[in-house]
Amino acid sequence: MILDILSNRCSVRMFREQTIPQDVIDYILEAGRLSPSGGNEQPWAFGLVTERRLIEAISCAAYNQKWIGRAPLLIVLCTRVVEDERGARDIQVSRFPEWKEEILNADKGFYSRMNAEEHQTKIPGTHMVLAALEHGIGSTWVSYFNVGEVSKLLGLPPEYIPSEILVFGYPGGEMRPRPKKNREEVVFVNKFNK
């Protein structure tokens, strides 16, 4: 069943003027809440945006991507930023020893934002997109936006940053999944030999 859902998923940028029922929104959020995270940290918060004027303002903060402003629902995936918790720099140095000096000497605020565990926030986002599709709701990920502006619009505290914007709505046209590479192009066994 999951492969059927995945094979039908595509980005949707045209939506019908139809409100998403609250029980479906709750289902989508629950799919995100149940997501795994490293060390079970759950370093996220989900900004549910349904107010038309706020959706339009976020559309402007996303460099005037007007199609976003016509969606009935946004979920902004927010990541909790922790400054150098659990030896984060040591972990990155162990991963990238050739960049040791740059990692250790980076400004604390800059480093904390660049090393934020945004990748973990993408896990619940993926779950939400698939849960929405189960209910016939299309979506698109948006990464291209002004983080500071969206933070202000949502009233986020300094320890959180918006990582991704998920745009949801009932498709206003036919959903056309794009072709994917075949397995041989993306899988290697034991050693990369392409």
Image (tube, rainbow, N blue to C red):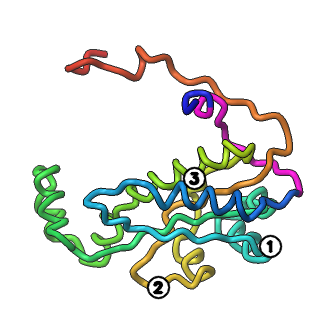
How much space separates mark 3 and mark 1, taking CA atoms?
21 Å
Pick the residue in front: 46 or 71.
46
Residue 125's spot in the image, x, y percent?
52, 54
Identify the disc placed on residue 52: 1
Residue bearing mark 2: 157
Please tell me which of labels 3 and 2 falls first in the chain: 3
User: Who's the residue at 62% across and 64% down the image?
Assistant: 75
User: Who's the residue at 73% across and 76% down the image?
Assistant: 54
Q: Is residue 69 above or below residue 168?
A: below
Type of amino acid under label 2: Pro
Q: Is residue 6 magenta?
A: yes
Secondary structure under tag 1 reads helix
Relative to residue 52, is residue 32 drawn left or right? left
The N terminus - image quarter: top right
Residue bearing mark 3: 128
User: Who's the residue at 57% across and 52% down the image?
Assistant: 128
Label 1: how many Cα within 10 Å (few below 14, some 14–19, many 20+):
some
- Between label 3 and label 1, give the one nearer the viewer: 3
Per the rendered image, the range of residues in magenta is: 5-17
- Between label 3 and label 2, give the one nearer the viewer: 3
